[in-house]
Amino acid sequence: MIQRFIKYINDNHLFNQADTILVGVSGGIDSVVLLDLFDKASFSVGIAHCNFRLRGVESDGDERLVSELARKYDVPLFKTSFETADYAQENKISIEMAARDLRYQWFETIRATHHFDCIAVAHHRDDQLETFFLNLARGTGLTGLTGMKPVNGKIVRPLLFASRDEIEKYRHENFLDFREDSSNQSLDYQRNKIRHTLLPVMETLNPSFREGLIKTMGYLEDVSKICDHAIQQNWERVALRKGNDYLISIAELKLLDPLPTYLFEFLKSFGFNSQVVSDIVASLEGGSGKQFISQSHRLVRDRESLILSPFQPENRKQFYLEEGMKELAFPVHLKISVSGKNDKFKISDSRFVACIDRDHIQFPLLIRRWQQGDYFKPLGMNGFKKISDFFIDSKLSLPEKENVWILANGEQVVWIIGHRLDDRYKITPATQNILRLDIDNL
């Protein structure tokens, strides 16, 4: 088994011989066997153990065994304990999910603090089968039926090649002590229901059921890769990146079939669930302006595109442009110059350049977000216009409006930065000194 262990590590590029690995050891048979395999393969490891305080003296006994294993293998030991039941109740999640969250969060803290290269956990082949049925029961896409991956970020699973029977045989042959978790027999836990009830029933239908399902999961993994490739190709066809945003063409999107499935695959990595995606699909037949929010992103239904942007709280900060400054780095990168007017001067027609009558302004100038009720006198016009109406006439999308900054002289708008100068501050024949602002990042 040791040779298969090393081969699986190398074939799946889990880590190198020079790497240090933090091994999650509960004291159960799986993690005890994993630790022994690491020792026989001469890898440099440390042990991480969590006491979840769920089984009283049993949990304390697990902790004592793990401490003995650390002494036996002469490796560093990191221990902690959690009030798991309280955490589950506070976060309104199951005990299983609470233990999982607490375990992996703490593992990562220890890994980063003590500079381990990765975290090894003892999931094996039979765990894959249980994961398949758990995901199937909850409802999942194709990826959810392919099982756990050998590598997931800093988490590695070097035992996925081995069945539970093989692990038990190795433990017996090597006289390894382990702790039997009495909760493994309880049908209160979903995995145990699958392990002790569903899988044995399936084996009465086909004695080779476990091997057959593992092969099927391998086929699904291959199909998933093909699907991922097709999804990526279509994403690149319908979506245009613009800075930190994506503009998703509605016309191109409607050509995809099945549209809801494609859109879900496009948006799931941005935090949108299937119900929200259904609402987005329904919005495609309506007007513009509807918004959809995930924890990390916002999607706005604009006229011809869905605009996908990182979600940020409203920014009310103000910045000042002081006299004598040559450059402003934030929130808009401006190059700043003041010069006297002469016959060679020519006003730029770029909206990214503002030429302002220096003698009509008083420093410091204020840079702020536009606000409802703001108005200005657009360059070339006689009357005043609300900035909100100017945005409508300019057909700016909601994210574009929210990214606009205003240059103000006291209460008066001087420049809608990157869009239009106020006519009151333009260069005239009477102008003597010119303030020139060049945008360097739009």
Image: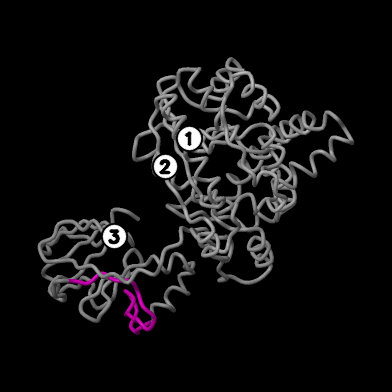
Q: Residue furthest right?
A: 205
Quickly name the residue at label 1.
66
- The local secondary structure at tag 3 comes to loop
Quickly name the residue at label 3.
332
The location of residue 375, given as percent across then percent down, is: 34, 81
Q: Earlier in the sequence, mark 2 or mark 1?
A: 1
- Compute the Cα span from label 3 to label 1: 56 Å
The location of residue 64, given as percent across then percent down, is: 47, 38
**Numbered mark located on residue 79 in the image:** 2
**Numbered mark located on residue 203 in the image:** none
Q: Residue placed at 54% from the left, 20% from the top?
A: 10
User: Which image quarter: residue 314?
Assistant: bottom left
Q: Residue placed at 48% from the left, 58% from the top?
A: 296
Vertical placement of residue 111 versus 295, above or below: above
In the picture, the quarter occupied by the N terminus is top right
Q: Residue placed at 26% from the left, 74% from the top?
A: 414
User: 132 left or right of 435?
Assistant: right
Magenta-colored stretch includes residue 371: yes
Point out the stretch of residues depicted in magenta: 365-385
Between disc 3 and disc 2, the foreground one is 2
Answer whether labels 2 and 1 touch (C-beta < 8 Å).
Answer: yes
Looking at numbered disc 2 in the image, what kind of residue is underneath it? Lys
Q: Nearer the viewer, residue 147 or 52?
A: 52
Magenta-colored stretch includes residue 11: no
